Image: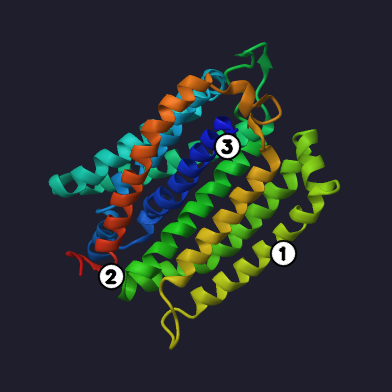
Amino acid sequence: MIDLTIIWAGIIAFAVAAYVVMDGFDLGIGILFPRFPVGRDRDMAMNSIAPVWDGNETWLVLGGGGLMAAFPLAYAIVLPALYAPLMAMLLGLVFRGVAFEFRWRDPGHRRFWDFAFCGGSIVATLAQGITLGALLQGITIEGRAYAGGWWEWLTPFSLLTGLSLLIGYALLGAGWLIWKAEGALQAQARRMARWLLPAMLVAIGLVSVSTPFLEAQYYQRWFEWPGVLASAQMPLLVAIVGFLAWRAIRNIGQKGGRDWMPFFLILLLFGLSMIGLAISIWPDVIPGRVSIWEAAAPERSQIFMLIGAGVLVPVILGYTIWAYWVFRGKVDEAGYH
């Protein structure tokens, strides 16, 4: 018999991964925004994400809504435990979205909207990273409810994951601009990527070294037989992909350089990080506390929702692919060409 709970866990994991991949680079552009000269370069950076940025956030809605519907117990525990960083994330996204639109419609206050765009991107990214760190380090539960304090989410490890995601999204944004921009903006993005990539590799290393000591199950899955056979390959793969990304960034502007290559190799680094995360927490939805089967909705509810997801997910994928295909070229201050 098909395990509907695993299917729903896969749908939500896919939605979260799609959000990180697609919204990560436009949040990264917001993080890097003050580094771009006022005028043409900032306009080009904004134009590069204008056709896709709001559609990218669809995956966040799907992931959050799917968690509430398919795993209501997890939603009921996670929301009060992480209320502060989650609200900060939503407010950051609101400020960022408003700034994106008003930057063009209210040029007299463009400096303020640029600040709001950057600030909202930084706050949203830090909040997402802190949320991940707080989940990994464990949530205090008694019975079927959250039993911790208001500030339980705020620890050195959660701040480390927040800073790491900030670096990672900034690197994604630089990779996107290397691919989509030309001239001075591409050169600036390349320079930033050359120091952001080593910083991201260091951040991955620090988070990876710290994670196994948060929970006994993490240590067992990473260092005990037979899991060590798979986990031992991850550092090597990260090092190889990191080297290839560094070489691809260095080759931009030279004969044989491929503008798209750094962005996709950076995405591969994110993919390896998410695989490592999955190795650590599977099959829990709240690591070390609640498994996906303990948190799952009744079978009939999962079947009903799966029918809707079977229609909506392909539609979302379809218009997303179409949007990226239509706007597949380079960008200038006037838009795509």
The amino acid on which the numbered mark 2 sits, given as a three-letter code, is Lys
Give percent across and percent down for residue 268: 55, 60
- Of the numbered discs 3 and 1, the one sitting upstream in the chain is 3
Distance CA(mark 3)–CA(mark 1): 24 Å
Determine the residue positioned at 40% across, 56% down: 32
Reading the image, the residue beneath label 1 is: 236
Identify the residue position indicated by label 3 in the image: 132
> Which amino acid type corresponds to the residue marked 3 in the rendered image?
Leu
Q: Which mark is residue 299?
A: none
Instruction: Label 1: state its secondary structure.
Output: helix
Image coords of residue 80 (percent x, y) = 53, 18
Instruction: For mark 3, give the secondary structure.
Output: helix
From mark 3 to mark 2, how far is it between C-alphas?
Answer: 34 Å
| Snapshot quadrant of residue 7 | top right
Tell me residue 19's x, y (percent). 43, 45
- Residue under numbered circle 2: 330
At horizontal 25% and vertical 54% (from top left) the residue drawn is: 51
Of pointers 2 and 1, the one earlier in the residue sequence? 1
Relative height, residue 98 to residue 82 (above, below):
below
Looking at the image, is mark 3 or mark 2 earlier in the sequence?
3
Query: What residue is at 41 percent from the left and 25 percent from the top?
Result: 304
- Please identify the quadrant where the N terminus is shown: top right
Please give the name of the residue rendered at 59% of the width and 32% of the height, measured from the top-left corner: 3
Q: Residue furthest front?
A: 1
- Identity of the residue furthest to the top in this view: 143
Closer to viewer: mark 3 or mark 1? 1
Q: Residues within 10 Å of mark 3 (few under 14, many from 20)?
A: many
Point out residue 121 in the picture as x, y percentages from the top left corner: 39, 44
